[in-house]
Image: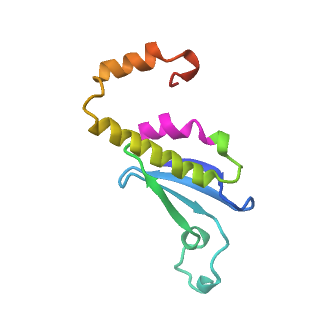
């Protein structure tokens, strides 16, 4: 599933695209860098999309988590240097939070978590 298409790393001339693969839970980025000249004479080769770099930025449990924790924020980092690093950091943070929630037996019930999110947090901090 396409996640985003306008993310940059250090080079403002090289646009990266993000995709989520639900089968492997991977978020990966690739760029349409010009085709590697090594493959110019090979007709069966797929061109720039198959020769350009492809980077796995991490794994996320589900598309729903991506929508809630990453997708809405991506437009704010689009077309800025460091976008790939930001996505990587957000994925790492999400997985560390899930790890803490799954291992810490002092965390309240799901109902208590929902009460915290809906009733305790100020309006400006509530998840949307």
Relative to 18, is 115 above or below? above
Colouring: rainbow
Q: Is 106 contained in the magenta span?
A: no
User: In the rendering, at what x and y percent does residue 21 appear?
Assistant: 42, 53
User: In the rendering, at what x and y percent does residue 64 appear?
Assistant: 42, 36
Report the residue at 60% width, 86% height from top.
38
Residue range of the region highlighted in magenta in the rendering: 63-74
Furthest toward the top, the residue is 119
Furthest toward the front, the residue is 106
Q: Camera-side residue: 65 or 92?
A: 92
Q: Is 67 contained in the magenta span?
A: yes
Relative to 43, is 59 above or below? above
Q: Quadrant of residue 32?
A: bottom right
Relative to 99, is 6 above or below? below
Q: Quadrant of residue 30?
A: bottom right
User: In the rendering, at what x and y percent does residue 76 appear?
Assistant: 66, 39
Report the residue at 38% width, 51% height from top.
25
User: In the rendering, at what x and y percent does residue 3 appear?
Assistant: 54, 47
Report the residue at 51% width, 45% height from top.
90
Q: Is residue 66 left or right of residue 47?
A: left
Report the residue at 34% width, 42% height from top.
99
Count of marks, rendered view: 0
Furthest toward the left, the residue is 105
Q: Look at the magenta stretch and give its main secondary structure.
A: helix
């Amino acid at each position: 599933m396409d996640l985003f298409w306008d993310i940059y790393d250090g080079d403002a001339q090289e646009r990266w695209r993000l995709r989520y693969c639900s089968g492997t839970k991977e978020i990966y980025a690739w760029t349409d860098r010009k085709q590697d000249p090594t493959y110019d004479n090979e007709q069966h080769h797929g061109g720039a999309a198959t020769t350009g770099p492809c980077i796995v930025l991490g794994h996320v449990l589900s598309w729903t988590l991506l929508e809630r924790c990453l997708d809405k924020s991506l437009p704010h980092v689009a077309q800025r240097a460091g976008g790939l690093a930001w996505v990587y950091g957000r994925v790492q943070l999400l997985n560390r939070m899930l790890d803490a929630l799954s291992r810490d037996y002092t965390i309240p019930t799901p109902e208590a978590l929902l009460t915290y999110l809906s009733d305790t947090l100020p309006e400006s901090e509530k998840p949307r």
